[in-house]
Amino acid sequence: MPELPEVESYRLALQAELVSRRIKAVRILTRSVVAFPADPLAGIVRSRTDAPPARARLALLLKGDTVTSILRHGKQLAIIGCSGAAVAIHLGMTGRFSLDAAPATHVHVTWHLDDDRTLRFIDPRRFGLVAGHESFDDLRARRWSRLGPDALAITPKLLAAACAGSARPIKSLLLDQSRIAGIGNIYADEALFAARVHPLEPAHNLAPDTLELLALQLQSILAAAIDAGGSTIRDHRMLVGTAGSYQNHHRVYARAGQPCNMCHELLVGLRISGRATVFCRSCQLHREK
């Protein structure tokens, strides 16, 4: 699943390519990945109807509009038009974008630009979502208000607030988007290793100096991953189709049974809240009280 660095790499690329471009046409090829405020349970689940969208609904996807900005919170993007309309995009497990590339399979929505290029939303597993909103305020109220603070801006104080009163393992808490938005399996494992925190440590047990170090490592690792275009494990490709490279810097993620690059003890794998987790028993001591 694309995490904050992968989504931010798209935001930066889309900001450079789309801002000030007018969208001449929008095509919805798969209605089930698109949602509008008037849909049943809009903002909670997507519509499953195959009925073609009305012209007004296409305007919510920015047809005829000019892009003014691309925003991100956690793992979600927002494309804003000069009309005020806003499109929320969640990439799900396998979602990605391509711009002006050869037509691909699993294309669900296309935006045709005034320079004759085409932006495509591609999602083989169809867990992603493209949602039209009348305004960014509506988008934020329906979608982003449920999310915790963005992980890229996390501070020791915000991290302490997220952990306060929670006996959950810190790994589980980091994956909870309502606590901190943007962290997934890759960067949770990497940050916990860098901060020498055991993934099963109860969140409320973390001392202030540990919280400070973990917040620092989260920001540092996320920033480095953004600079590298994210981690390409299977599906992630940057806007121009090239792979990210931060996977070459992973120290624990998906390396169970391999030597720790700090102490050379074999890394351990286990499941926490149903998610594969890798850590070092020597470098990440369990201090549960």
Image: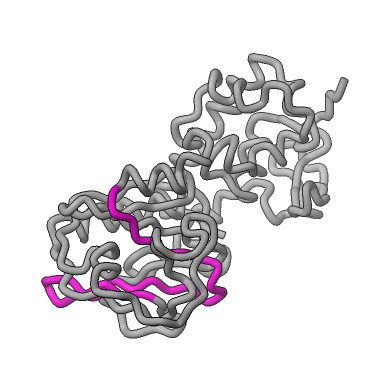
Give the position of the C terminus as an image quadrant.
top right
| Residue at 75% in and 48% down | 278
Left or right side of 11 for 24: left
Q: Position of residue 32 (x, y in %)?
A: 49, 75
Residue 52 left/right relative to 261: left
Instruction: Please indicate whether residue 88 sits to the left or right of residue 164 in the image.
Output: left
Where is residue 66 drawn, in percent x and y?
Answer: 15, 59
Answer left or right for 40 relative to 188.
Answer: left
Q: Is residue 160 above or below residue 125?
A: above
Which of the two residues, 7 or 109, is positioned nearer the viewer here?
109
User: Looking at this view, is 6 or 266 the one in front?
Assistant: 6
Residue 224 in which image quadrant: top left
Q: Residue furthest top?
A: 208
Q: Residue at x 81, y 51 (%)?
A: 271
Q: Could you say which is closer to the camera, residue 7 or residue 66? A: 66
Q: Is 74 part of what is drawn in magenta?
A: no
- First to last magenta residue range: 109-135
Residue sitting nearer the eye, 173 or 240: 173
Above/below status of 207 relative to 105: above
